[in-house]
Image (cartoon, grey):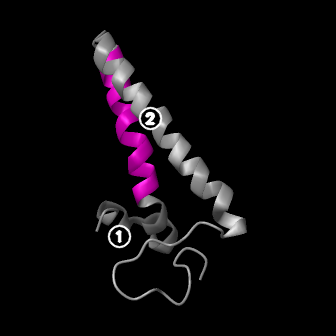
Amino acid sequence: MKAGIFSSAGGRNSRALGGTLLQLIVPAALAVSFAVRQELPGTAFCAFAFFHSLTGVATYMADALRLELPLVTVGAAPTKRSMTG
């Protein structure tokens, strides 16, 4: 499970947000770490990765109410969306 470390910490919402939080926290923490050590290439790369991840998160946040994006599944199609039901 991608968000396994958040499973025991706080129920359904923390599991649902776990992947998104890690997607944003890891590059941000690494960018800060590189910045403290004054390593410009590492800082720039991690900052780019962080802001690039925000564009992906924004896409799904914008679709949260419209529900227009297709679901990605393996095998049989689900009967409902996992984040809304």
Tag 1, which secondary structure? helix
Q: Position of residue 12 (x, y in %)?
A: 48, 74
Q: Residue sitting at 52 percent across and 68 percent down?
A: 13
- Compare residues 72 and 25 and report the one nearer the observer: 72
In the depicted structure, whether residue 33 falls above or below residue 6: above
Q: Residue sitting at 41 percent across and 41 percent down?
A: 25
Residue type, mark 2 in image: Phe
Numbered badge on residue 16: none
Sooner in the amino-acid sequence: mark 1 or mark 2: 1
Q: Is residue 79 magenta?
A: no
Q: Position of residue 4 (x, y in %)?
A: 30, 65
Numbered badge on residue 8: 1
How many numbered markers are drawn? Answer: 2
Q: Quadrant of the C terminus?
A: bottom right
Q: Quadrant of the N terminus?
A: bottom left
Q: Which residues are magenta?
A: 19-35
- Compare residues 6 and 85 and report the one nearer the observer: 85
Q: Position of residue 80 (x, y in %)?
A: 56, 86
Numbered badge on residue 50: 2
**Label 1 vs label 2, nearer the camera:** 2
Circles 1, 2 touching at the beta carbon (< 8 Å): no
Q: Is residue 32 magenta?
A: yes
Q: Position of residue 23 (x, y in %)?
A: 40, 47
- Compare residues 57 and 24 and report the one nearer the observer: 57
Residue type, mark 1 in image: Ser
Q: What secondary structure prevails in the magenta region?
A: helix
Tag 2, which secondary structure? helix
